Image (spheres, rainbow, N blue to C red):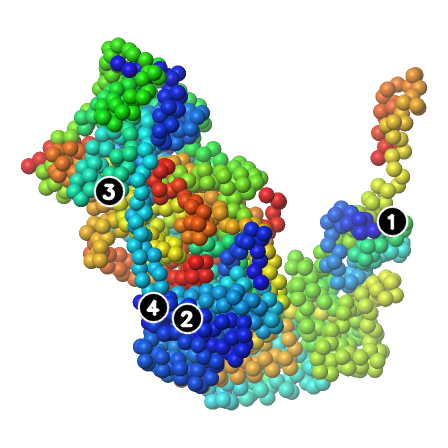
Amino acid sequence: MNDLKDRVLRMSGSAVVKCMRCGKCSATCPSYDEMEYHPHEFVYIVERGDVEKLLSSESLYKCLTCFACVERCPRGVEPAKVVEAVRLVAERQQGGNRLKPDEIPALCDPDLPGQAIATAFRKYAK
Amino acid sequence: MRYDEIFAAMLKRAKELLADGTVNRVIGWKRGEFSYDVTPAVFETPEELDAGFVYDAFCGANVSKYLIRESEKPGRILCFLKPCDSFSFNQLLTEHRIRRENVYAVGIPCEGMADVKRIRAAGIDGITGIREEGERFIVSTLYGEESMDRREALAERCLCCKSKRHPVFDELIGDEGEDAPDDARFAEVARLETMTAEERFDFWRGELSRCIRCNACRNVCPACTCENCVFDNPASGISQKAAADSFEESMYHIIRAFHVAGRCTDCGECSRVCPENIPLHLLNRKFIKDIDELYGAYRAGDKADARNPLVNFTEGDAEARIVHERGKA
Amino acid sequence: MQVKEATGFVPTIVAFCCNWCSYAGADLSGTNRLSYPANVKIIRVPCSCRVNPIFFLRAFQRGADGVILCGCHPGDCHYTTGNYYTRRRMTLLFSMLDYLGIERNRTRVEWVSAAEGQKFAETMRSFAEEIAALGPNRRLADLRCRKDAEEAGITDERGSGDAV
Amino acid sequence: MKYLPLAGLNAFLERAAQSRKVYVPVDEEPGKSSYRLWTPGTVVSRGLNTTRSAKDFFFPQTENLAGFRIEDKKIRVLDPRRETEDFAVFGVRACDAASFGILDKVFLSEPEDTYYKNRREHGLILTMTCRRPAETCFCSVFGIDAANPGGDVSFTDDGSGWYVEAHTEKGSAFLSGMEELLEDRDPSGAEEARNKTREIMARLPLAGLKTDAFGGGKTKALFDRPEWAELSEACVGCGTCTFVCPTCQCYDIRDFDTGREIRRFRCWDSCMYSDFTKMAGGNPRLTQKERFRQRFMHKLVYFPENNDGEFGCVGCGRCLRSCPIHMNIVKVMKRLGEDDHEQ
Amino acid sequence: MQKIGVFVCHCGTNIAATVDVKAVAEALGREPSVVVSQDYTYMCSESGQNLIKDSIRDYGLTGVVICSCSPRMHENTFRKAAAQAGLNPYMVEIANIREQCSWIHKDKAEATEKAIILGRAAIAKVQLNTPLIAGESSVTKRALVIGGGIAGIQTALDIAEAGFPVDIVEQKPTIGGKMAQLDKTFPTLDCSACILTPKMVECAQNENIRILSYSEVESVSGFVGNFTVKIRRKARYVDETKCTGCGLCTEKCPVKKVPNEFNLGMDNRRAIYIPFAQAVPKIAVIDADYCNMLKNGKCGVCSKVCTAGAVDYKQTDTFVEEKYGAIVAATGYEISDVSRYDEYAYSQSKDVITSLEFERLTNAAGPTGGTLLRPSDGKHPHTIVFIQCVGSRCTPEKGKPYCSKICCMYTAKHAMLTREKYPDTDVYVFYIDVRTPGKNFDEFYRRAVEEFGVHYIKGAVGKVAPRADGTLEVQASDLIMNEQLHISADLVVLAAAIEPSKSARSLATLLTASMDTNDFFTEAHPKLRPVESPTAGVFLSGMCQGPKDIPETVSQASACAAKVIGLLSKNKLTGNPCVAHSDELMCNGCSNCANVCPYGAITYSDKEFRMPDRTTKTRRVAWVNPAVCQGCGACTVACPSGAMDLSGFSNSQIMAEVDAICK
């Protein structure tokens, strides 16, 4: 849990503890109504360490990254960067590598051009 | 600009300023016996200038410190300041050590100063004359003519020149230069920092144990301008005439570096004059590097009314334990 | 209670304490009977900013194995700003000693308020333990002043004239 | 004549080191050498001269003279003197070798300086001729022959080895056990090597330096010369010239309280320092000009005046190399000797 | 060498139980220069003190070391005893063998050994002690108060009441300050002018008070008890001694469109004006930036209508120089600039206003005569939104890092008064926290909610957008309902952060008083000396020290006055003799010491020195004013040459202690 929180904090570079819970980020958010969790909640939930709750929320993809909240936040918390970081965590978690190098020999067809294998590998590996 | 061009311009300007009464003396460098042994000197007439005045790659001596004394004398003195010298000069102005109104400062370009020790270190001895030819020095010796890459002969401080800019001047000869990036300057300090404490201790013991306490570093230093140095003052409790043991060797250099910390302009004179080739500038540069890293970039002598970082603070300054927490050693 | 190693080494420790906070903190630890090693000896100064780096070196020269400086917490200085200067001076001094290869843990700055008797005692205990673990100060010592050197017959090469 | 080939040097030094400490010049870095204690594997410098002179072995920079211990309210005096171990200094050039004559006149005249004497008695000076003098050399000006350096034993360098000759009883005794390490050679080779050195010495840029204007009895003529002001103008007042000088012999006596006893020691002093000769009533030399003048007047006038005309300088050139501002005795002699000011 | 007496105290068993006091006395008695060493059960008792006094006389002691409790306990006791026996009190040193020895160690041998070492350190120090005599200086019995707001007024009145003359320097043409602009005051809702103007009048009438309005401090020199201050009296172009304040000129002046600063530019005044009806002094002033006569010599109406002949277009700035014993900074505050926050549309819409502007809009003497009307169209607003913490509690890049303290309460007041007067108005207050510590404060806020139906919403406003219909769309979040609100408002009121007066920084420099990073004056001690500046003789009153409301300001103003009165009541100031001093012969004049001195105690002067070679040389050297120096010693370390030293804690004394401990 804390591992996830640490990752989000590291990736966002945001100091969520600076938040004074004014809600100005949410007040200024153009996607507010679309969101299950609003920017101030993102900040608070990350601070509490419940990142998993956010990972499964569609709110992640509602943020327009317009940075209005970053601009307006009086405490320099940068909520949009927190949202962005959670989104990256979610994306990186979606499945592992779909293809591993040691699985390739079995799949190889002698007629398959070498370049196609390389392309496929690039496409399916994360 | 080549040194001969700069010199011609300096000589002309010096004569003009003497003639129109702007100044009554000129401080510069005087030719010696062997073309590398110039001496800082004061000239009063055009004839004296013609007879001995020189400016070339061996005029490394920083004349700014002499201006403390010279600016107390009647009349105005013309001084030629290399960029390094002008930082020192400016720092001395900040500390109210020089009467600015009695000095006419002309900034001159510096193409790097050679160190005869480096020429000797290249195995060239019996030097009777040196001339520049493009990027090479042609050295005539008792045992034949030798030649070496100009860069190889430059003093360490010039190989990592901090600035070609003059933070203070009344007029300039040539175009104003620019600050150089600092990375090269601190490379050697950084290398020492990555050593283990034992290695550093051995390194510095090896260097400092050669110290003969001749005080050349202190007496040439433009930041060491105390009326009475603590090491000469029996009342200070730490006065010494010679280092009686390794502690006193270290003590002298630690305190000296500390007393000039935040005031040292890194002119490199201490290392130039050390008869034992102790890299004293690495002590001063360590303080400069620490100050830059801990309290923000600061250059002594850059601004005339600046407050040096040791007589300044911010509430958020690092705690001393930052030193203890640095990477393991 | 003196911190001793198996070798019986009892370090000599000098603690500079500012009159208004840390010296009072030391008094408080006494009032509360909070013990700390007897080899810690306190010198009272008006403010931590009175402590010259020379005093640190002097202590090492005369045989100290560790030197600690205590003052008011930043922002609480009786003289408003004194400890801010202390902080810069000592940070740079310690960094220089470290650069010269002298064990960085032989020196320390600690902020102790007049109310922190407990902290004072704990600080002194931990510092004394640390110095005991480091062993005798050799790298910044003046052998002429060290009892143990004299007893062991160690002399510095300088002064004897036998080496140049 | 005895000859030590280059290849035999290590064996020779090894033998010598069995009976005494042997100090040899070692290249610390290119172009700079210092005396170091010889141990197997030490590479002897082939360079000209060490940064510091051989004087340091006989008159060290600091030396304990006496001690005092306070016991309750009484004071006990301690005498730290002990006999010095035997030692030898190898590779001493003619200039440094000549400096001992000057130092002896100071320290061994009555009352004898027992500390210095102790070291002199136990120290062996192994000299060497110069094959590649530097532009800063001017020993010949003071009548010193770089090809004939003297000392206890001299080593005349012919490029592939040394002709070895003892000049004192101490020197002969030293060599007596080492015959098998030395070859026999015709002495003509030595003379040839010496002539080569002398030929170079003659064409050195400072060889023609004149001493006529100096020497005993010149105080009046020189003391008030206006040139002192200009010569001393750039002097930064450090002690470098005096500390590298093989003949400077001034010292100060100081006390140090170790906490258990007071140590009285002497340490080099420099006439260039502002507190040199400072006394209760003040200081007779008030400005750097006077201190600067003192150094050169001492070497060139006062010393010869008291020592049968012998100058207090041996022309080693160390001060020419190490002065931070390149002011030195040669410039002084040229400036003051260039015109005829004699009355 | 000193003749030292050592006195070892048993402190009953407090020391004697753990420390072998006889052994300590015996060991220390063997130290060189110790001529007598004794122990006694209670050194601080009368008989103990007599023992010390007798020994001083009998042995002719020049120094005394007492091994006892902490010097913080009885240093003064023993110093007094020594003084009574004719020994300089500063020749006494204490070795703390109780708090720092017997009470913390259990092993008697160990504690005894430590006590001996501590005793030796004290002996080593006292060897180097010199008799110190505290300096004295006189006190000019006059105070200067800089700033004529409620803080300055209260301080001046209290000082004057105590019988000391006071000058108030006010940069505006009248005293009264911000409080004069307020309508009602919380939590009592009494009228600001009704309680302030009597005090203003009192100032004018008190013969101990001189009001120097339209004036600024030009320079300050001297030190506590002895300041000399030069004050610039700006040209009013009206002779103060002649003007009767009839106001005829202000009606006849043809230049009518000058923004009226008293109403924050919401209406206009003339080029010659009296700031407001109750102004003190009630004297007209000509605004040189607008006056036609002064600008191009064409007009002169005011001069013609003035029956007193008071108008004088040729007036210039004049200077007053006066000596003061104490100076009070009461420079107050300003409203910070809110136009930087684009999201609140302050510079886009006239209907977005600050709370201070709101005060003027509800004040009977304001631009609307006290009726709440929108600045844009003069209509009654029906929906009003108050936004809290505008520019307060921000990161330094975004605004002020502190809480402005007064906004919660005045907003409750505004909301309450609005609802009371105009019940048809909806009032929303967007808050982050409601902070109401103070007597009757929370009750007041609750009344706003419970009795007056003000809508308090926890959340911030994200955006205020002016719409074509003249309304303002307020987009905000309701953090409790977790929804975004869109309110159509007629008027938006911003609780703008307060900030110290812009003139405070330069004044602090003149006074060498220190400031924090927000430009509030720093107090000598945040808890124990809250109304004094660290610079002796400089006191702090009101908002210049930090945000505070009126009752707090007035309490602090009176506290400050008490401190000033305490100082001015003294005929002589006795200094602490443990102060820094500079050795002129060694001083380089580099200014390092002055840079670190928190008290401005160090000044420089060029001094002529006779050099050993009989020439003279002029050098810049430092001088420490012993009356100002507090003895911290910062300068002694900043000084590279060691010219600066501290009496009582000299370099050599501290090193002697170090030596004795490390021996």
Q: Nearer the viewer, mark 4 or mark 2?
A: 2
Q: CA distance from mark 1 to mark 2?
A: 78 Å
Q: Is residue D2 above or below residue B262?
A: above
What residue is shown with label 4?
E33
Nearest the viewer among E29 and E589 is E29
| Residue B257 in the image: above or below residue E633 | above
Q: Amino acid at mark 2?
A: Glu
Res. D136 visible in picture: no
Q: Nearer the viewer, residue D205 or D304?
A: D304
CA neighbours of label 3 inside 10 A, class few (<14), some (14 to 19), many (20+) = few
Q: Which residue does the image show at 42% across and 33% down from the upper left? A: B155
Identify which residue is drawn at 16% across, 28% down: D210
Which numbered disc, 3 or 1, marks the residue closer to the eye? 3
The image's mark for residue E26 is 2
- Quadrant housing the C terminus of chain C: top left
Q: Position of residue E387 (x, y in %)?
A: 76, 68
SS category of the residue bearing label 2: helix
Q: Nearer the viewer, mark 2 or mark 3?
A: 2
Question: Which quadrant of the structure image shows residue E589?
Answer: bottom left
Q: Amino acid at mark 3?
A: Thr
Q: Which residue is mark 1?
A: A55
Amino acid beneath label 1: Leu
**Dot 4 amino acid type:** Ser
The answer to whether dots 1 and 4 both sit on one chain is no
What subunit carries mark 1?
A
The residue that disc 3 covers is: D114
Q: Residue at x 34, y 46 (%)?
A: B242
Quarter holding the N terminus of chain C is bottom right
Q: What is the C-alpha distance between the residues marked 4 and 2?
A: 14 Å
**SS at mark 4?**
loop
Foreground pick, E565 / D99: D99
